[in-house]
Amino acid sequence: MLNLLQVHESSGLSPGTETLKRSLKLNRKRDRKSTVSKTREGKKQRLLLKKKRSSKNSGMEVREGKTYESEIGLEHPDQEEIPEVMEIDKFDKEAITVAPLLVFDLETTGLSRSSDIIQLAACSKDSTFDTYILPSQPISKEATNITKITVRGNNMLYNSKPVNFKYPHQALTDFITFLSEFSCKPILVGHNIKRFDCHILYNALRFYNMYSEFCSHIIGFVDSLDVFKHVVPGLSSYSQTNLVDTLLDETYAAHNALEDTRLLFRLITCTSQGNVISDNITDFIFSSNYPHNCHMHQDNLTTFSEAINCKALSKATALKAARSNLRLCHLKLSIERNGLDGLRALLSELTNQGKVRVTSCKKIIQKMYDFLTPES
């Protein structure tokens, strides 16, 4: 292969200083690349890249089905696409370091995720939000004992005293308006929200088709329960009341949403542990799409019930498939398109992080194939 100097000489040209520098630089770069490519690591890297390309192409062929073939529309009506691998949400590090922290809390009609919100409060360094919400379902006795909130006719009472309230749609609209007034999108912080509050809030907002708008005004969530377990290990209890007692040496009126948010904001910013959220934000922030994805994953998982019961698939593997946006019908479709190879290509497809989508274990894949293709 001719280098740049040789090209000039063969053309009868006299290369200038910059051309000489550039050609020498390119030659050195080419020589380094050639040297590296001959090493063991270089060969391993080429094989890895080849494997990734092959996995991606095989996965796409199985997921998309036949898309180009003579008379494809007549002979192959199969146009359903199997969902691609879900990418891991990435956060802008600069954005999350300057984002304001907004602590929020809910009081609800019960302890299930299908409960209604009866109080929604939020607290940041410079602003607060608080509203009572008239529920569409009765408040359980246990919830009343905890929150001291009751409904009598068209009146809401806290500690037996009437309070102003709003209907759900108006209260949620006001909350989104409150979020939109922040100059930078906030990060919502709450205690035990990953297991409870996020899902309640998601259900309420989704009912009124407001969740997408809500997500457009926040960066993500942080569950302070997980953060405190990391920052202050070994406590007998990580309830908010115990954390306030242990770290602030105080007691307070727990289970009033506004008081809960005020005390939690102090916990995450004003203890000897420093600003526990800001110091650990990159490790504990999770996407605003988390509750939606959880509902979708649970729905996907139910499709694998028979396979799990028949021990054709372990629950752990089924859960991994469900979290990868796969349902049992997608596995069947991959077999229809390309048999055992199709199932293998789908389950072992590589993610954007280079990890296997579900499994590459031949034994597990064969067992699943046998379950989905019983002898007639």
Image (cartoon, rainbow, N blue to C red):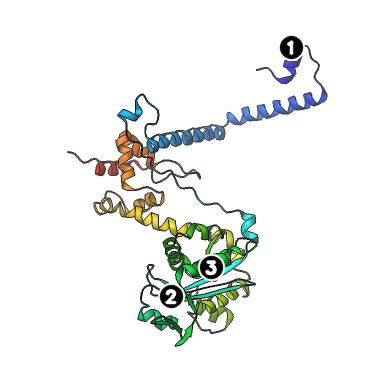
- Label 1 element class: helix
Q: Secondary structure at mark 2?
A: loop
Q: Is label 1 in contact with label 3 (beta carbons under 8 Å)?
A: no
Question: What residue is rendered at 43% in x and 55% in y?
Answer: 293
> What residue is shown with label 2?
134
Identity of the amino acid at label 2?
Leu
* Rendered image: mark on residue 10: 1
Amino acid at dot 3:
Phe
Q: How far is the residue under mark 1 from the one under mark 3?
A: 74 Å
User: Which x, y percent locates residue 106?
Assistant: 47, 72
Tell us which disc is closer to us: 2 or 1.
2
Q: Quadrant of the N terminus?
A: top right
Say if 44 sits above or below 196 in the image.
above
Q: In front: 252, or 78?
A: 78
First of labels 1, 3 by sequence position:
1
Residue 6: x %, y % from top left: 73, 16
Q: Which circle marks residue 175 in the picture?
A: 3
Q: Nearer the viewer, residue 341 or 180?
A: 180
Label 2 environment density (alpha carbons within 10 Å; few <14, some 14–19, many ≥20): many
Of 296 and 359, nearer the camera is 296
Q: CA distance from mark 2 to mark 1?
A: 87 Å
Q: Residue furthest front?
A: 154
Determine the residue positioned at 32% across, 40% down.
333
Determine whether 198 is above or below 247 in the image. above
